[in-house]
Image (tube, helix red, strand yellow):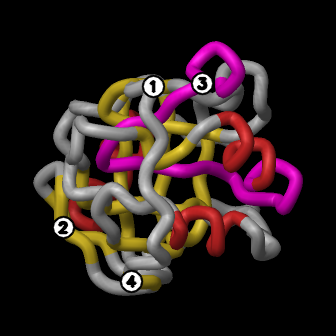
Amino acid sequence: MSVPTTDLCDDFADELRVMNPMFRDFGGRVRFHGPVTTVKLFEDNSAVREALSEPGEGRVLVVDGGGSMRCALLGDNLAALGQKNGWAGVVVYGCVRDSAELATIDLGVKALNVHPLKSVKKGIGERDVTVTFAGITIQAGDWLYADEDGIVVARNSLVQA
């Protein structure tokens, strides 16, 4: 099931929060949606690995990386792990790496940009906390819808499975 974000905006404008248009597509899946799980961290992707190691069950991992442009928070290995474990997608407020490989993995990946340097691994980060970036606030349990035209978030599911 894939409903364009433009149609969702037309039909549910009062129920949506629309992210500022700053994200680029990197994954092999451009259109994705699902319930949100959040992580908040800064230049340490340990919490990303921890989350993507769990069964995704069609969820979308929203990573508040503070918008850092100094290292990548997701690469091909973590994306492949997320795809294997059933995640629908990952939205990174920060950078990714291995962009050519990411494009071959059946996982939605949106991020600000690319960076070749991997992050540190100190085990620092918060899980399922409220995050604010790109002009909106997102909570664990919200529903995120992403496609070529952008990213929108709602409190509840807006489409039938």
Tag 2: amino acid: Thr
Q: What is the C-alpha distance between the residues marked 1 and 3? A: 7 Å
Mark 4 element type = strand
Instruction: Give the mark nearer the N terminus: 4 vs 1.
Output: 1
Q: Residue 98's mark?
A: 3
Q: Residue 132's mark?
A: 2
Q: Is residue 90 magenta?
A: yes
Q: What is the C-alpha distance between the residues marked 4 and 3? A: 25 Å
Q: Position of residue 159 (x, y in %)?
A: 60, 60
Q: What is the C-alpha distance between the residues marked 1 and 2? A: 26 Å
What residue is at 78 percent from the left and 34 percent from the top? 106
Which residue position is annotated with label 4? Answer: 126
Instruction: Give the mark nearer the N terminus: 4 vs 3.
Output: 3
Front-most of residues 57 and 43: 43
Mark 1 element type = loop
Q: What is the C-alpha distance between the residues marked 2 and 4? A: 14 Å
Stretch of the chain drawn in magenta: 82-102
Q: Position of residue 98 (x, y in %)?
A: 60, 24
**Disc 3 to disc 2: CB gap under 8 Å:** no
Which residue position is annotated with label 1? Answer: 116
Tag 4: amino acid: Glu
Q: What is the C-alpha distance between the residues marked 4 and 1? A: 24 Å
Q: Residues within 10 Å of mark 1 (few under 14, many from 20)?
A: some
What residue is at 54 percent from the left and 45 percent from the top? 74
